[in-house]
Amino acid sequence: MATTIAKPESLIGKRIKRKEDPRLITGTATYTDDIQLPGMHHASILRSPYGAARIRGIDISKAVQHPGVVAVFTGADTKDVGPVPCGASLPGLRVPHHYILAIDRTYFAGHPVAVVVATDRYVARDAVDLIEVDWEPLAAVADPEKAIAPGAPAVHPEWPDNTAFTFHQENGEVDKVFAEAEVVVKQRITSQRLIPSPMEPRGVVADYKSGDKTMTIYSSSQIPHLMRNLVAQMLGIADNRLRVVAPEVGGGFGCKLNVYAEEALMGFISMRTGKPVKWIESRRENFLTTIHGRGHVDYFEIAARKDGTILGMKLKLIQDLGAYHQLLTPAIPTLSVLMMPGIYDFKNIRADIVGAFTNCVPTDAYRGAGRPEATHGIERMVDMLAAELKMDPAEIRLKNFVPNEAFPYATATGLTYDSGNYAEPLKKALGIVDYRKLRADQAKARAEGRLMGIGISTYGEICAMGPSPATPAGGWESASVRIEPSGKVTVMTGIKPQGQGEETTFAQIAADELGLSIDDITVLHGDTMVVQYGIGTFGSRATAIGGTALYLALQDLKAKIKKFGGMLLNSEDVSFGGGECVCNKSGKTVALSQIAGASYRAMKLPPNTDPGLVATNFWEPPNFTFPFGAHIAVTEVDRDTGAVQITRYVAVDDCGKIINPMIVTGQVHGGVVQGMGQALFEHGIYDENAQLISGEFMDYTIPKATMVPWIETDHTVTPSPVNPLGVKGVGEAGTIGASPAIVNSVVDALSPLGVKHLDMPLSPESIWKVLQGGRA
Amino acid sequence: MKISGSYLMPFPQERTYSLLQDPEMLAQCMPGCEQLVKIADDIYQMKLKMALAAISGQFDGKISIADRIPPASFRLIVEGTGKIGFMKGNGLLNLSPRDNGTDVIYDGDVQVGGTMAAVGQRLIDTTARMMIKRFFDKLCEIAKG
């Protein structure tokens, strides 16, 4: 019956060069700061210099009179706007009212207090210095453990215990297994505050048209549709009159998965002044006022048998929330708890979270969001257990992995791991480094007095966030595909890439399904007036959910193409492939471009078929996906300087099926570098008065090209059964796998000196101090 | 942040003590001091220009003197606020006679906030030391005539 059409070579799995890159590397991309509107004003914001202070008065008279200043607004003007939204809900959660400008009290250094609007950015900035605030400094607290101890200054006077929430999760017989365990290891482990530091800071342009009561907000955002809904509420305007455009976004890493005071503030200003207004965050403001990541103090306990079988784990997690809840602040540590079993087969778990208010900028999602903290803790504990039992760290992991036959695997925390083959990446990584020889090399190095370490981490993660019941605003994703009259294809997706390259991967999917060239596909995103609706890009979800919505829309479209093709070929038995329809009887063909033209011209229509070739799909995932992998870091510590050199880094990741291996490798590289940043360099530090003292790149070290080792990447492929593409997600994997691999490696290097644990970052100074102690 | 050190002034203890409390001398010798006006006994209002790393700005503040035990010791309390942040300092100065003059031993605590803290923390210690040294150098130079 069917004539087989020679299927052109699939684009899936090909290292296609990114379609985004020409505009990025030629400087022709449009970022928020590139937007120029006629008559546009510029805003600059006065921020609290104190961690906590009462505002006794604000005198704006000098600023208002400054030449070029259009208006100055304070909290008294904006008090009816907002509040800045918290999208997470937990039982008993205390949510402070988060005004867009402080009213009579500030709660963290950087808290916005007043805004100057002027004809010029520099004038606005200068006039900020003319605002006089009568401050009464108050006692502040920055350390989350001190904040929840008795007698600490209250961040919010109405809640003197500084406790925003507590959260308990338990499964199995925790007390019993700990009582009966042959070995119990305990350790306090911190995941320090990190400053996400995207290359492009935040920025907002707001443009209100009073004639038709419509607003356009341009914002460097990962979530334009959610921002539209929330900012419309904050400003009291209808969502169908607010257009949010996220233009080119120069990195997000979670810090732009948020709605801040500034979007609504700029909207308010544009409504009041009748002119467009722009605010571009300075790098110093970015350090002080854009969310930070991590901020954990974790008390872990692990129980095991002497043979290395893990029986259970306990965790007391103190989350430094900062002064307010941003969009997902309190939800982030709950992800750590969900991830607590890692990829190991044990069912006895107890976790207690205390969410601590501090006089610091809020923490929220940062690449990995809760899972790096959890994985770091678990992988440190497994290594410490191995050291206690004098077992090899690879052997103890292989012994405890969830076995292949157990999938789908129900975890102690209520998740269902979709698919896994956990031993495979580890075996592959061990093979790549030639583990036995490496250990022999290490013994030799030690005999020579060198401090060489080998560190393993085997991580699992929760990706493709997520099924709607598990997410605050819907966890599905949408795609609309329009085959234009010429046969060229326009894809509109609800995701919002910030460097992940979906304009390329999605074009690969569409081109592959339609048998077209990748150059025939245009992928649009980031504009609520263009895209039907969407959730956004975060939680390694874009391809697994957005890509699936696209794939399913394409299936609908292919069915319709076949109807038009059949009509044009006068046949009821047609196939579609390679960009054309073929009559399976006659072998006659008609090209997609002809079919598309006919579908719009609509001189004749197939039965029960509407004109045009457009299909839209909203896809709700039935589950998360659960990627995994094994990373090995080989390090050498300089005895004299404490500097850590990563001499070898191997990452074997399993992210399911791979659409573009080059992009996947890029994601792993970027993730590993950020994980390495946490392990070795980065630390957002507040002093005892809640002053951020790591407020610029001179004091906050992010990895530079010369600090980054050669990263050897490889993969195993275990398709996800959750979606028809079989993909899992890879955006956060590198970050999650890297920090424990590196820290385990350095602890291994220093273990001859009796070192059992080190907290991040492993700066040369901190290691040098350990070495001095070790010699004493 | 703790700041401590000492400076040998080539004057007898009593002369040293009075020099260190002479508002005119202080105004002349304090680096960046643009104005020092007495507003009450032992309390002076001050305008000071300060530079720290890439930032600089004017501070309005107060200096007060307390816990006097002439000619052996006194306490200096400094507070200032400006557009680049704020600072607070509190230090005890002990004067010990030596063969060739008087050793001024200072021991204090400095707190800073705002932009100064965010971008200048690592330089506060060295900047403060440099300012203290300049202050004493100039004081000695003027006092010697």
Image: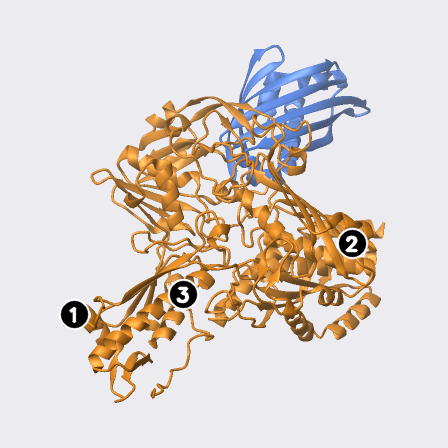
Chain colours: A orange, B blue
For mark 2, what is the residue?
A: A756
Q: Residues within 10 Å of mark 3 (few under 14, many from 20)?
A: some
Q: Give amino acid for label 1.
A: Arg
Rendered location of residue A52, percent (x, y): 56, 29
Q: Position of residue A183 (x, y in %)?
A: 82, 55
Q: Is residue A554 visible?
A: yes
Left or right for A117, reference B131: left
Q: Secondary structure at mark 2?
A: loop
Q: Residue at x 21, y 67 (%)?
A: A611
**Identity of the residue furthest to the left in this view:** A603
Label 3 element class: helix
**Image quarter for residue A138?**
top right
- Residue bearing the label numbered 3: A21
Question: Mark 1 or mark 2, which is nearer to you?
Answer: 1
Furthest residue in direction top, as rendered: B41
Rendered image: mark on residue A601? 1
Query: Mark 2 touching mark 3, by CB under 8 A?
Result: no
Residue at the (79%, 25%) spot, across then down = B100
